[in-house]
Image (spheres, rainbow, N blue to C red):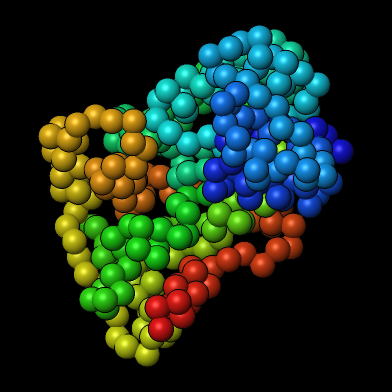
Amino acid sequence: MPTVLVAGATGDLGRRVVRELLARGADVRVLTRPASSTADRLFGGTEGVVVTRASYGDPAALRDAVRGVDVVVSTVSGVRDVIVDAQTALLEAAVAEGVPRFVPSDYSADYRSLPPRSNRNLEFRREFAGVLDASPIRASSVLNGAFADMLTGQAPIVLADRKLVLFWSDADQVLDFTSKDDTAAVTAAVALDASAPRYVEVAGDRVTARELARTMSSLTGEPFRVQWAGTTGLLSAMSKGMRRFSRETDEAFPAWQGMQYLVSMYSGDGQLRRVDNDRWGEGRDWTSTRDVLAAHVASRS
C-alpha cells in the first residue's frame, strides 16, 4: 500500500482521514510542527503511523518529511498564511522530492465558478489551486459542499427553537451537504487511487430549505416552515459591511465569513455539478441530512 503523509492530522477532519487510511491498510506519516506534542498524544504507538516533525518555514525539514511518500494529503485549516503559504511550502518540498501526488485542503463547495472576492476562504483555495496546477505534481481535490454538522446550529439555517428553516432568495435552491466521516472516507479513497481525477465531487445529501423543513416537521412532530431571510445580494452586502468594520484577524470563520458561505450556497454559485458518489462511496451508506438532524433532535430531548 502507498505511504501517505497527512498534514493537519491533529485536526477534526485530519484525524478522521488518518483513521480511514489505516482502515484501508495504508502506511501513514503524520506531519506536525516541532514544538507540538498533540500528534504524539493522538498517534503515538499506533501501528502504521509515524510522526514526523517539520516547520513550514523550514524547506529542508519539509523535504525530509515528504521523502519517500507516495501522496501528500493536506487537511490544514486557516486563512491565507496556511491555505496558500504553508501549503505552497509543502508542495514545493513534495515536488523537490518527486512525490507523485498531492491532495490539497479544499473540502468545500465548488470555488471554481464563484465571483471573485465573494468568499474569502474559498478564494484562498482557488488561489492555491492555481499554484498547484502550475506544478508538475498530479493533484486531486475533494469537493463536498458544506459539512452537514452546519445544520445543527453552526449556521443559521435550521432554527429549531423557532421551528423555522431560513433561506435566502430561493427556498428550492439545491444545497450540498456531506458529513465529515463521509468526506474523510472519500479523501482516503482518493489518496489511494492513483487514477483519481483533478476534482472529485461528492455529496452525502442534496436538499432544499423546503425539504429540510419537511424533515424537521417529521422528526419533531411539530410544523416547521421556511422563512425568507432576504436575497443573497443583501446577505452579501451585509457580509461586506460587517467585514469592513471588523478587525481583520487570523480567525478562519468570523461571522461575516459564514455569511459569505451561505451566499455561495444559496446563490447556486458553489453548487456541485458532477457528483459521483457511486465511484467514491464504495457502496457506503451515506449520512443524510435527516440522519444528522435526527441525532441532533434526539440529543436535545
The percent position of residue 7, horizontal first and vertical second, equals 61, 32
The percent position of residue 69, horizontal first and vertical second, equals 78, 25
Q: Is residue 77 above or below residue 80?
A: below
Q: Is residue 73 visible?
A: no
Q: Is residue 79 above or below residue 274?
A: above
Q: Relative to 246, is 90 on the left or the right?
A: right
The residue shown at (35%, 63%) is 153
Q: Is residue 68 visible?
A: yes
The percent position of residue 277, horizontal first and vertical second, equals 64, 56
Q: Is residue 288 above or below residue 175?
A: below
The residue shown at (37%, 37%) is 252
Name the outermost residue toward the bottom. Answer: 221
Q: Please identify the quarter of the rendering in which residue 123 is found.
A: top left
Q: Is residue 165 above or below residue 147?
A: below
The residue shown at (32%, 68%) is 158
Q: Quadrant of the C terminus?
A: bottom left
Q: Relative to 41, is 255 on the left or the right?
A: left
Q: Quadrant of the N terminus?
A: top right
The residue shown at (70%, 43%) is 43
The percent position of residue 76, horizontal first and vertical second, equals 53, 34
Numbered-mark total = 0
